[in-house]
Amino acid sequence: MKKKIIVDMDGVLADVYPRLFDIHEKETGDRLSAEDIAGKLEEEAFPNQRRWVSEPGFFRTLPVMEGSRKVLEKLNKEYDIIVVSLATEFPNSLTDKLMWLKEHFSFISWKQIVFCGDKSLIKADIMIDDHPKNLDNFAGKTYIFTQPLNLHNNNSKHTRVNSWAEIEKILIP
Ligand SMILES: [Mg+2]
């Protein structure tokens, strides 16, 4: 039986930080860097973040994380992949995220996508995520994908991965 992997969207498949930096700069004139916000949750680093992500279109045009498409396509042959995203808190994100996946990850079928408000509802063997709140209580193997919010996280339960190339090296035999 194939192992099941939960793959996160924001900060793992979708490169959300460049967009947050852009909008923050547009609204405040201040260009932040990853170092400026290292270790801060998105909502601490960007006080207006909830308003931005509530608007239709925010998630529809995010850049694809470098290397993610190629490696996820390979993983999709070796594992049961489920893309799981916290989305139901922001109703406008639902269609945007689904259409974004359809455009950029067309090999992921609609049966492999779960939009929810709590990832602990989903059981699997492996989780790839950038947010400790999703990883900390996951029963299986956890990979923490490096993003500004988790730069100072050194929970030894999680294996840190800095790129999709690293994920490929670890998970593709
Ligand atoms: Mg994430």
Image: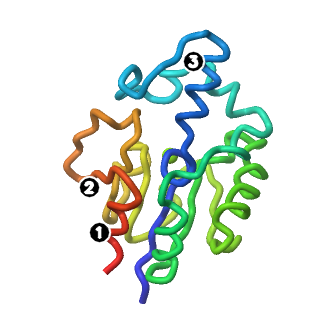
Q: What element carries label 3?
A: loop
Q: Which of marks 3 and 1 is nearer the N terminus?
A: 3
Residue at 73% across / 46% down in the picture?
60
Neighbours of disc 3 within 10 Å: few (<14), some (14-19), many (20+):
few
Furthest-bottom residue in this view: 1
The reply to whether discs 2 and 1 touch (Cβ–Cβ < 8 Å) is: yes
Q: Distance between the residues labelled 3 and 1?
A: 36 Å
Q: Is residue 123 left or right of residue 140?
A: right
Disc assigned to residue 47: 3
For disc 1, the marked residue is 170
Q: What element carries label 2?
A: strand
Q: Given the image, on which type of amino acid does mark 3 rest?
A: Pro
Furthest-top residue in this view: 29
Furthest-left residue in this view: 156
Residue at 64% across / 74% down in the picture?
107
Q: Is residue 146 left or right of residue 97?
A: left
Q: Nearer the viewer, residue 111 or 15?
A: 15
Q: Which of marks 3 and 2 is nearer the N terminus?
A: 3
Neighbours of disc 1 within 10 Å: few (<14), some (14-19), many (20+):
few
Neighbours of disc 2 within 10 Å: few (<14), some (14-19), many (20+):
few
Q: Distance between the residues labelled 3 and 2?
A: 29 Å
The x, y position of residue 149, in whole percent, is: 40, 33
Q: Quadrant of residue 108?
A: bottom right
Q: In which quarter of the image is residue 100?
A: bottom right
Disc assigned to residue 159: 2
